Image (spheres, helix red, strand yellow):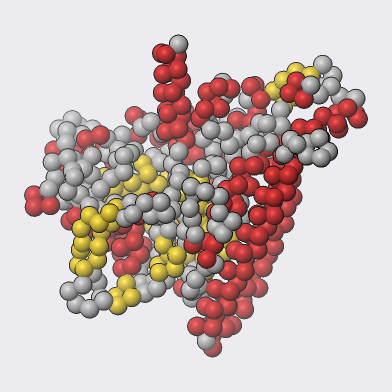
């Protein structure tokens, strides 16, 4: 019995590994409907979701900038100072969250942890975490290309302090270019005074008419260091691989970055990554008939078969594989046989299943893009035809399937206090995150009944936001022509009003759902009882759980 429990626990851990992790979808400017460049990020797992606008700042000569660890967990534990580096004279305004994602020049950064070969694990002397590198890049870069070079230089000089999964990927865009950048350590023996770089990194440009997705898997394959229009790479990438025993230049084999450093064929998350690769590629380039089992060998990026809108990307962020062979709600364990109705799906069936339930129910796990443990998410649009102040993030909290995408313009100066407040150790009615998290959790208790009802409430509100965008931006542009500061005030007020309306709506939904799910209601309780009464009225035999 002990061994059985042990293996079940191991299975649950492996399922969690295959499921946790972030998804970034990237689209070039010639592949989009409106000529915007898109990147995105589902920030899956428990990270700091407080949205803080950090203003531009000036510093006197000789100033030093602290380097911190645990930025992603700053909502629940103190930052740890690992060191400091010379500060620049001027830092740009940027938007700070667990993984900071935008600055005033329309440089946007998505993040997704990727696997790596165990030999790349760096030394205790490395101090540059990926989230700290993002902060420095946003403070200092005016373009995506410049951000790549800044991140690479800092990681090499101060050492890349990798996560427990070794590799990291950043998807970096500006109004003209989109880049995928991957970073790994150089092994445990590195020291700052060794004279050697403390990181290996490579970045590949996404062609303007292409799209790609990075789902916790290394995506860069063959590198051409001479093609600086499309590749940026550290000088030591082959040398370090040889030193670590990851590549033999005399083998005659080509140097494939995602195999050498990314170790993709041995990655514990590879199945969860493959489902997302398949889903995005099949959606935006369906005629190529992508095979799921070949997902690890998909090309870095693909030409879009028709123009992609930001709404298309948002739809994928809500995606749970419905209508595909990988829809977990259609698997046999969710069905029972009714004497009159035949094969019936229980309304408990949900795609938002945690690893424990997957094991107990005997489900086959396929990782969708939208997950219940998401902290926050965004889809960013960098646009060269509007002022930088109208660069746009579609931002939201918790699970994107059951949340609202809020327009956050780069010109805003602040957000409501409740969107800057987070304590997950207790329910807090003054924290917006709790409203969205509770609705998602309650809906998933009785998904088959409550999910359609939730959509009836939130989708009209979401469509209203989308419909308002053109008018809002037209008004902001008119104001900008005469008074840019007033235009920013207008955008701040608009974004704040949408945030507060969405938050209020979700707290109302919390109260409604708590009442409906209560099994001690005056009318005898809950949706299960309502379903039972309805079945009696129609003469249908209720399911076993209602008998």
Furthest-bottom residue in view? Answer: 482
Which percent across, then down, holds residue 140?
Answer: 31, 68
Left or right of 475 on screen, residue 295: left
Q: Residue at horizontal 26%, vertical 76%?
A: 59
Picture quarter with the C terminus = top right
Which percent across, then down, holds residue 431?
Answer: 55, 57
Image-quadrant location for residue 286: top right
Left or right of 399 on screen, residue 187: left
Which percent across, then down, holds residue 492?
Answer: 55, 73
Q: Nearer the viewer, residue 175 or 216?
A: 216
Q: Residue at horizontal 57%, vertical 48%?
A: 437
Q: Is residue 165 visible?
A: yes
Q: Nearer the viewer, residue 50 or 214?
A: 50
Q: Residue at horizontal 74%, vertical 35%?
A: 519
Image-quadrant location for residue 322: top right
Give the tally of numbered discs: 0
Q: Residue at horizontal 65%, vertical 21%?
A: 332
Furthest-left residue in view? Answer: 194
Q: Nearer the viewer, residue 421 or 318?
A: 421
Q: Is residue 226 visible?
A: no
Picture quarter with the N terminus = top left
Placement of 491 over or under 380, stated as above or below: below
Which percent across, then down, holds residue 456?
Answer: 74, 50
Q: Nearer the viewer, residue 231 or 287?
A: 231
């Amino acid at each position: 019995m002990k061994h059985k429990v042990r293996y079940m626990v191991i299975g649950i851990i492996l399922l969690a590994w295959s499921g946790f992790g972030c998804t970034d979808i990237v689209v070039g400017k010639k592949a989009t409907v409106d000529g915007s460049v898109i990147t995105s990020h589902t920030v899956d797992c428990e990270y700091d979701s407080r949205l803080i606008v950090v203003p531009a700042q000036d510093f006197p000569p000789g100033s030093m900038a602290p380097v911190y660890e645990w930025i992603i967990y700053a909502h629940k534990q103190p930052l740890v100072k690992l060191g400091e580096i010379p500060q620049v004279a001027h830092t740009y305004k940027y938007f700070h969250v667990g993984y900071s994602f935008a600055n005033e020049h329309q440089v946007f950064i998505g993040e997704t942890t990727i696997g790596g070969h165990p030999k790349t694990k760096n030394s205790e002397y490395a101090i540059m975490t990926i989230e700290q590198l993002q902060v420095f890049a946003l403070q200092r870069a005016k373009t995506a290309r410049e951000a790549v070079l800044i991140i690479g230089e800092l990681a090499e000089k101060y050492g890349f302090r990798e996560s427990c999964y070794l590799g990291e990927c950043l998807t970096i865009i500006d109004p003209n270019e989109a880049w995928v950048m991957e970073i790994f350590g150089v092994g445990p023996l590195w020291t700052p005074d060794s004279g050697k770089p403390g990181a290996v990194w490579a970045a590949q440009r996404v062609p303007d008419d292409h799209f790609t997705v990075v789902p916790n898997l290394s995506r860069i394959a063959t590198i051409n260091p001479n093609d600086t229009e499309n590749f940026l790479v550290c000088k030591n990438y082959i040398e370090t691989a040889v030193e670590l025993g990851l590549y033999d230049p005399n083998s005659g084999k080509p140097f494939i970055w995602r195999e050498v450093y990314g170790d993709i064929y041995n990655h514990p998350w590879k199945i969860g990554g493959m489902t997302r690769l398949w889903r995005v590629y099949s959606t935006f380039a369906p005629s190529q008939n992508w095979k799921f089992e070949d997902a690890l060998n998909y090309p870095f990026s693909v030409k879009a078969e028709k123009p992609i809108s930001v709404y298309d990307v948002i739809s994928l962020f809500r995606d749970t594989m419905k209508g595909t062979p990988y829809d977990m709600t259609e698997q046999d364990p969710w069905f029972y046989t009714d004497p009159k109705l035949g094969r019936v799906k229980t309304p408990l069936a949900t795609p938002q299943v945690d690893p424990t339930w997957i094991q107990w129910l005997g489900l086959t796990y396929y990782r969708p893009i939208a997950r219940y443990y998401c902290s926050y998410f965004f889809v960013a649009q960098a646009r060269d035809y509007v002022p930088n102040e109208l660069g746009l993030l579609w931002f939201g909290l918790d699970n994107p399937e059951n949340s609202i995408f809020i327009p956050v313009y780069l010109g805003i100066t602040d957000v409501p206090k409740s969107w800057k407040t987070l304590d997950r150790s207790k329910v807090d009615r003054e924290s917006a995150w709790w409203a969205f998290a509770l609705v998602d959790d309650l809906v998933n208790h009785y998904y088959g009944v409550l999910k359609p009802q939730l959509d009836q409430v939130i989708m009209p509100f979401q469509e209203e936001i989308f419909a308002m965008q053109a008018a809002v931006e037209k008004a902001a542009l008119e104001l900008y022509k005469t008074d840019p500061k007033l235009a920013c005030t207008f955008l701040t007020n608009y974004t704040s009003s949408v945030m507060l309306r969405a938050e209020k709506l979700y707290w109302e939904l919390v109260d409604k759902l708590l009442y409906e799910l209560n099994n001690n209601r005056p009318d005898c309780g809950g949706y299960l009882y309502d379903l039972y009464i309805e079945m009696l009225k129609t003469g249908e035999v209720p399911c076993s759980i209602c008998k």
